Image (spheres, rainbow, N blue to C red):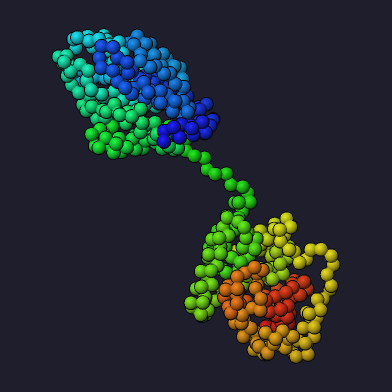
Amino acid sequence: MIRVRLMLLAVAAACWGAMALAEERLALVIGNSSYGAVSALDNPVRDARLMAEVLEGLGFDVTLAADAKQIEMKRAIAQFGRKLRSAGEDATGLFYYAGHGVQSFGSNYLLPVDVALADAADLDLMAIEAQSVLRQMASARNRTNIVILDACRNNPFEAVADLNASGLAEMKAPTGTFLAYATAPGDVALDGEGANSPFTEALAREITVPGAPVEQVFKQVRRAVLEQSGGRQTPWDTSSLVSDFTFAAAAPEPVISAAEMEEAQVWASVKASRDAMQIMLFLRGYGDGRYADEARVLLAELVQEELQTGGAAVAEAPADPVQDAETAMYQAAQGDGSKAAYEAYLMAYPEGQFAEMAAAEVAALAAGTGQDPAAGGDAPAVVPEVEQEAVQLAEAGPVTYASPLHTGVAEISGLTLAEVVTRSPSFPPVEGLPDSYWKGQSCGNCHQWTRDRLCTQGNTYLSLNMQRSLGKQHPFGGALKQVLKSWAAGGCQ
């Protein structure tokens, strides 16, 4: 798992980019395994190399010291302090140590590989006081420092008087510092049976989590070590940080194209409407889009609701006449299907409730992804079917809401307008619409037709004088549009 994460660090490092210019990251990593006078340890050098590799991938300028003697440790700590002081107040400093560590009289000491000790009084002469690292960091006056000690192994000096305490002592974190121990003060950490200690293995994994705050990182490390050790080892930390810090930058937000954003906005509007006709129109324009499946599911739900309720009319508050006119004009544009019709709607209602849908249709027709009935060569001034229907209507007398219609369309001939809107279409209102969505269904399920809305729609045909719209095929035939136009011409009686 760790190696897989390491393969991703090259990608993660790219996230720092400009951030790295403003925030320099410096790390000193020390791992001591090959002790001469005390018991050797298996994992610290491997732990240090793993941490160095991970930290470099996270944008740190890492200095690595393996199996360091006392003079080498002191030199590395001094150089680390100088680099941190010159890096500026926005810099982040990190010190990691794996190896033997002991406490004496409340102070903690990190042991170099050449340590040889017979008397506790010589400890500060032979080892490195952990407080010296904190002093170097404090002198830099930078914003964020992190100290990580995987040094609470077994005490190699238990036989030496005044050096028989286990683990490390608790240290106070100076302002702007995060202190982390592999286990609680006074306890002993496990070196581990694998290639790395349980603490460092978990730490190397968790610090690569994008966007995880440092506090969350060590909380996850604590959980992992507790689980792996069966509760025998509890990592411990203390913080006086005053700024937020994350090892790995949060993953960037996915880039969305203008077309994808437009599709998302249109779908949000259509979905909120819960209008079957708008959903069908959406599927016409975005049938292969990312929301198409969701749209089909919602359309099926709406149709099923209509079937269960039997299409019963629901009492509504009187509609706003302005909104009725807008709805009728948009429905007229849908029926016409031409770019000019949708543009006419947008000119009349640039901020209307259907503006996004109309704009999407205009764009689709302009791009050639839709069929514009008004495009191409000149059309006949009057479609023969409409001309014939107009003659029949004139011979039959004025059209009223309650009078039988006299048309050449068997499905509606002899019915009143009030009856027509309750009938089922003769063929799908939208090409490719499944039979279950329209066969045997009332047109009112989608159009929400009322007498007032039909009148407004008929007046729209009058005002636009859209002969192409009147002649365009309709689920009841082009005759119904001519009927509505004639009815509106007579004052919608």
Query: Taking the image as drawn, is residue 117 in sight?
Result: yes
Q: Position of residue 92 (x, y in %)?
A: 42, 25
417 or 191, which lies in front? 191
The quarter of the image holding the N terminus is top left
367 or 244, which lies in front? 367
Query: Does residue 222 lie above or below 415 as drawn?
Result: above
Q: Position of residue 170 (x, y in %)?
A: 24, 25
Query: Does residue 390 lie above or below 340 as drawn?
Result: below
Q: Is residue 349 left or right of residue 56?
A: right
Q: Quadrant of residue 53?
A: top left
Q: Position of residue 148 (x, y in %)?
A: 34, 26
Query: Does residue 148 lie above or below 307 as drawn?
Result: above
Tell me which residue sits at (21%, 26%) in the image. Answer: 186
Q: Position of residue 337 (x, y in %)?
A: 71, 67
Query: Does residue 295 lie above or below 39 as drawn?
Result: below
Q: Quadrant of residue 424?
A: bottom right
Q: How many marks?
A: 0
